[in-house]
Amino acid sequence: MIRIGEDVAENQLVIPAGTQIRPAEIGGLMALGFTSINVAKKPRVGLISTGDEVINPNQAPRPGQVRDINSYTLGALVEKSGGEAIRYGIFSDQFSVLKEAAAQALSECDVLIITAGSSASTRDMTADVIRTLGEPGVLVHGINTRPGKPTILGVCNGKAVIGLPGNPVSALVNGYLFVVPVIEKLLGALPKPRASVQAKLTVNLPSQAGREDWWPVKLNQVESGKWNAEPIFGKSNLIFTLASADGLLRIHPDATGLSAGEMTEVILI
Amino acid sequence: MIRIGEDVAENQLVIPAGTQIRPAEIGGLMALGFTSINVAKKPRVGLISTGDEVINPNQAPRPGQVRDINSYTLGALVEKSGGEAIRYGIFSDQFSVLKEAAAQALSECDVLIITAGSSASTRDMTADVIRTLGEPGVLVHGINTRPGKPTILGVCNGKAVIGLPGNPVSALVNGYLFVVPVIEKLLGALPKPRASVQAKLTVNLPSQAGREDWWPVKLNQVESGKWNAEPIFGKSNLIFTLASADGLLRIHPDATGLSAGEMTEVILI
């Protein structure tokens, strides 16, 4: 509901549609006597995890089992970005089971995210399932980034459907790259700069030309306002790589790497 | 409550104290089976507005009256920064009334913020009231910044007490500069870089040497990832100046201004 202050003409443009309501906007509204406004509806984002080996985080894994991480990292990312996360749980690697769960979730949500199990067969199954959900279906299957190669981008009857890798680091990095912009689009948000920090790279980072790399980096303060960016190495599938990172460093596809000492832009996560 | 997963030794350091729980940390916790953790208590921040001319935002101002903006902008900033905002309302410009309200609020909160009415006498009264609240009292009365000159920084019996100018732009800018760091300190937060964007200044900005200036600027995208910083001019007390700004541009006290075309760091707000 919009309550119009006595000193403002009805329909007068106070704050453009798509503006995020920050403390300053609240002040502007209060100054004019608007104590209640309409805001964009939170897009509902359905989350499905697949894989016979995936268990709930409160269970103790037996040999060969892994806890479901992706529903929770992506769910937190969705909520942080202004969406409503709906976790549908973990489904087995059977085409009919996954297809039914995905169709149900998509009918109830504005966006659907399926994170694949670790096996290549599961990943292909995700694409096959997305093809059954509506037209046009899979638009992109596989992207030339690291991490994120197996990412699937689709649209089914006007709703975005995204297949993300099972690898938790890859799933979350590609969530920042592909899920957040979809939520912002559905919110009608005006374009805004991504929060970042200029930092000096501490080591050489090689990269394949033609591939876009996103490196988790830790920011270490050298002096007030001056930061070093230290890439985090280690097993690329461990979510702790990201938990100890302050941001992501992009290596442009045209580059064959970055040199120690270069000033780089670190996107805060 | 901390539930320890069966595969982690009790007291093992998973995430250092003071870390903000982002999606990646949630993933790290889930991977280890921690589905519930202790987090820092939100600091309680009391907000008092003073001034006989100040009215609630849902009231229609008569000549000479202004709506209370500062309780709401600062309240939103406090909540955004991880604190709990408690608005005590608007109090008249009488020493005994303000003193009693401030003492009551400080006894119930971890931090107290008093925003002054527009008259110089009210501002001085704020300092006098802070002196009655406990030792050591007022530490700083007046700072060499624009906006923010009349800002008062105090400590009363171990609690931060901050007097901010009545001018809504000045109150909010100085909230970013002084209130947010206090909340982060009380949360025990590890130091982290402020979200910023490198942008090219569109015009010359003069400044007085010896004074630190914070200019509200609008960021305009030139091409993907390239931004121009356009300072917002106009009446300096209008909160709409900040509502149309994407960030704040700092002019160092040693500088006598910035030149058009310079690359500058814009702190996102």
Image (cartoon, coloured by chain):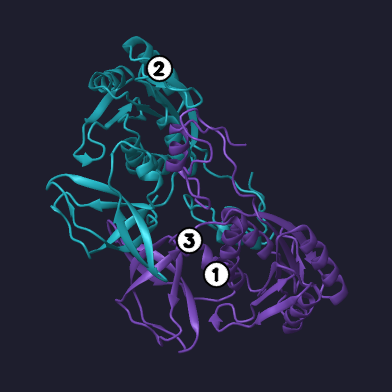
Chain colours: A purple, B cyan
Q: Nearer the viewer, mark 3 or mark 2?
A: 3
Q: Where is residue A95 shown, x and y percent of the image? A: 84, 76
Q: Is residue A58 left or right of residue B259?
A: right
Disc 3: which residue? A191
Determine contact: label 3, label 1, CB under 8 Å: no
Disc 3 element? loop
Residue pictured at 41% horizontal, 67% vertical: A266
In the rendering, which numbered label is found on residue A48? none
In the rendering, which numbered label is found on residue B91? 2
Residues at discs 3 and 2 both on one chain: no
Q: CA distance from mark 2 to mark 1?
A: 48 Å
Pinpoint the chain carrying mark 2: B
Q: Is residue B60 left or right of residue B245?
A: right
Q: Is residue A62 left or right of residue B202?
A: right
Residue pictured at 75% horizontal, 73% vertical: A63
Determine contact: label 2, label 1, CB under 8 Å: no
Q: Is residue A1 above or below residue A121?
A: above
**Residue ranking furthest to the right:** A96
Q: Where is residue A218 shown, x and y percent of the image? A: 42, 66
